[in-house]
Image: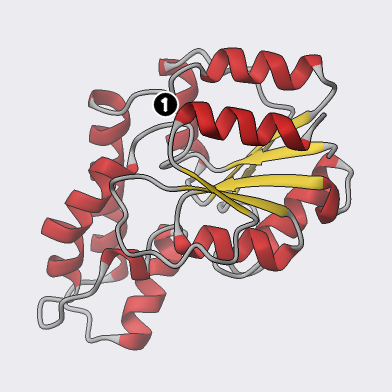
C-alpha cells in the first residue's frame, strides 16, 4: 500500500471520549430537545452537516448559528484542556515514513481544531497532506467523497490507500471509496456496525501492527 489516511478524532487523539459525552448530554438535547438522537447517528460527520442532518430528520430548537457556536466552544475546551495522543503515535509515523508511505490526515474537523491538536502534540510537518471536511466541495462522511479526494491529493488510487477510522460513518465513507479500511474500535462508541471494514482492531498496538502489515 502506498498511503495511510488517518482520521483525527477517536484515532490519533481520544477526543471522541469527550465529544460523545458532550453531544449526548448537551449538544444533541439542546438542538433536538424532543427526541433522543443516538450520538452514533452523527459521529464522524462534519459538524455543519450535522446540523443539516438534524434539521432534515428532526425538529431543531436552535439556529444553525447557535449550533455552530456551541460546537466551537466545546471544541476549544476539548482540544485545549483534555485529549491525549494515541500512545506511540510519533514512533508509528516514523516507521511509516521509513517504509516510504505517504501519510495524510483525513478529518471532518476544521483547520482551527487541527491546529490546536498539532501544536499541543508537536505534529506540525509530520503529515504529508491534511484533508479537512472544511475544504471539500462534496458531501462529507458517510459519503466516500472525502476519501476519494484524499487519495487524489496524495497521488494514489483509493485501492492503494489504507484508511483508519473509528466511527460507523467514517468506516462507511472509507470503505465505499475503495480503500483498505481499518476500524479502530474505541470505548466511546458502542454497538457500531463496523462490518464494512477490512480489519477491526481494539488497541494502539493492534492498530500499529495492522497498518504496518499493509505497507510492507
Instruction: Tell me the residue at 31%/68% (across/down).
Output: 64
Horizontal placement of 71 versus 134: left or right? left
- Quarter of the figure with the N terminus: top right
Decide: is 107 above or below 192. Answer: above
Residue 112 visible, this angle = yes
Image quadrant assignment for residue 93? top right
Residue 45 visible, this angle = no
Instruction: Tell me the residue at 66%/68% (across/down).
Output: 138
- Quarter of the figure with the C terminus: top right
Decide: is 67 above or below 130. Answer: below
Q: Residues within 10 Å of mark 1 (few under 14, many from 20)?
A: some
Residue at which label 1 appears: 116
Q: Which is more toward the observer, 202 or 104?
A: 202
Horizontal placement of 111 versus 186: left or right? right
Instruction: Tell me the residue at 73%/22% (across/down).
Output: 96
Decide: is 12 above or below 175. Answer: above
Q: Position of residue 10 (x, y in %)?
A: 41, 42
Amino acid at each position: 500500500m502506498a498511503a495511510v489516511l488517518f482520521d483525527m478524532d477517536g484515532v490519533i487523539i481520544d477526543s471522541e471520549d469527550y465529544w460523545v459525552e458532550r453531544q449526548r448530554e448537551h449538544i444533541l438535547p439542546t438542538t433536538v430537545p424532543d427526541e433522543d438522537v443516538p450520538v452514533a447517528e452523527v459521529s464522524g460527520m462534519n459538524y455543519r452537516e450535522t446540523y443539516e442532518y438534524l434539521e432534515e430528520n428532526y425538529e431543531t430548537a436552535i439556529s444553525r448559528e447557535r449550533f455552530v457556536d456551541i460546537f466551537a466552544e466545546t471544541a476549544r475546551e476539548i482540544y485545549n484542556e483534555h485529549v491525549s495522543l494515541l500512545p506511540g503515535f510519533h514512533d508509528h509515523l516514523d516507521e511509516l515514513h521509513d517504509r516510504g508511505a505517504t501519510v495524510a490526515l483525513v478529518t471532518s474537523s476544521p483547520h482551527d481544531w487541527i491546529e490546536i491538536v498539532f501544536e499541543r502534540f508537536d505534529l506540525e510537518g509530520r503529515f504529508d497532506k491534511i484533508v479537512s471536511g472544511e475544504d471539500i466541495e462534496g458531501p462529507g462522511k458517510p459519503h466516500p467523497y472525502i476519501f476519494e479526494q484524499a487519495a487524489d491529493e496524495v497521488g494514489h488510487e483509493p485501492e492503494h490507500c489504507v484508511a483508519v477510522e473509528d466511527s460507523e460513518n467514517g468506516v462507511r465513507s472509507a470503505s465505499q471509496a475503495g480503500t483498505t479500511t481499518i476500524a479502530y474500535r474505541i470505548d466511546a462508541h458502542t454497538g457500531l456496525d463496523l462490518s464494512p471494514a477490512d480489519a477491526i482492531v481494539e488497541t494502539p498496538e493492534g492498530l500499529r501492527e495492522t497498518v504496518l502489515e499493509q505497507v510492507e
